[in-house]
Amino acid sequence: MRTEKKQAYLSNENISVPLFKNKWLDSLTRTHIAIPVSMFFLYAIALLYYTKVATDLTTLQVTSLYLTGFLFFTFAEYMVHRHVYHLPGTTEKRAKFAYTMHGIHHDYPKDKQRLAMPPAMSVAVGTILFFLFELILDKFSFSFLAGFLSGYAFYLLVHYSIHIFLPPNNMFKALWVNHALHHYGKSDTMFGVSSPLWDYIFGTTHAKLKGSIPTDLAHDH
């Protein structure tokens, strides 16, 4: 007997529903994509400039640290998406946490205002990472963090583009396919948004990775 497939979202339109009853608190969960992207790219540029004028690192060292930081972000992105955003709702508190952090995005995947980290949280995360990396890496931290933040800004642009624009006819089309499988196929697969690297390493690729993009994501806007 054929059963109807359960819909993976509540709305696939650009609508934004309240997450909190308090209007001020709810406003902190929204942002325009340009704000955090600009913040992180400018932060990265400032860190690279500071590295140049305040340390004795060579250009090769700075470049290597920057690229390592960028790659490390893709790992952090994968782990947070898999183990924090998709935290099993074994208790009411865990379920509420997961929904607040990420579940609402799966219910309303085309909500433009919730496709990036809000500015207040962006500042907090950037500050925490600065002190954490400096504590661990000392003078090597600035270039590494610049790469990490650039990776995050790139992720934000990719994630926004995937949900808002039609897929391009080039190699980046694979990113649209991967994320469509995560949203409209199996949400316990394809956790990497900016790169599928760690999905291949940890075995969380989708069984139907090859093929066309689900119409839910690819429809005309």
Image (tube, rainbow, N blue to C red):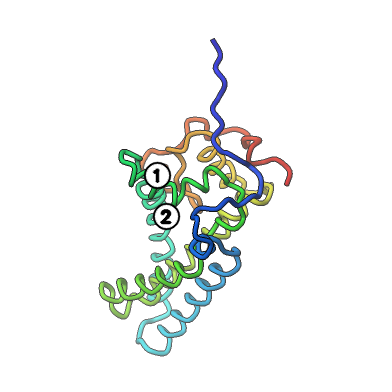
Disc 1: CA contacts within 10 A as few (<14), some (14-19) or many (>=20):
many
Q: Residue at x 41, y 42 (%)?
A: 200
Q: Helix or strand or loop: what does disc 1 sit on?
A: loop
| In the rendered image, the vertical position of residue 140 relative to residue 101, given as above or below | below
Amino acid type, mark 1: His
> Residue 77 got which mark?
2
Front label number (1 vs 2): 1
Q: Nearer the viewer, residue 122 or 38?
A: 122
x and y percentages locating residue 191 in the rendered image: 44, 45
Q: Residue at x 26, y 75 (%)?
A: 135
Q: Helix or strand or loop: what does disc 2 sit on?
A: helix
| In the rendered image, the vertical position of residue 157 relative to residue 128, given as above or below | above
Where is residue 143, by image quadrant? bottom left
Amino acid type, mark 2: Glu
Which is nearer the N-term, disc 1 or disc 2? Answer: 2
Q: Residue furthest right?
A: 220
x and y percentages locating residue 193 in the rendered image: 50, 50
Spatial separation of the CA atoms under disc 1 and disc 2: 12 Å
> Residue 86 got which mark?
1
Q: Nearer the viewer, residue 220 or 107?
A: 107
> Residue 134 got which mark?
none
x and y percentages locating residue 161 in the rendered image: 62, 54
Q: Nearer the viewer, residue 16 or 164?
A: 16
118 left or right of 143? right
The quadrant of the image that shows the N terminus is top right
| In the rendered image, the vertical position of residue 83 relative to residue 209, given as above or below | below
* Pointers 1 and 2 in contact (C-beta within 8 Å): no
Q: Residue furthest top?
A: 1
Q: Residue furthest left?
A: 136
27 left or right of 201? right
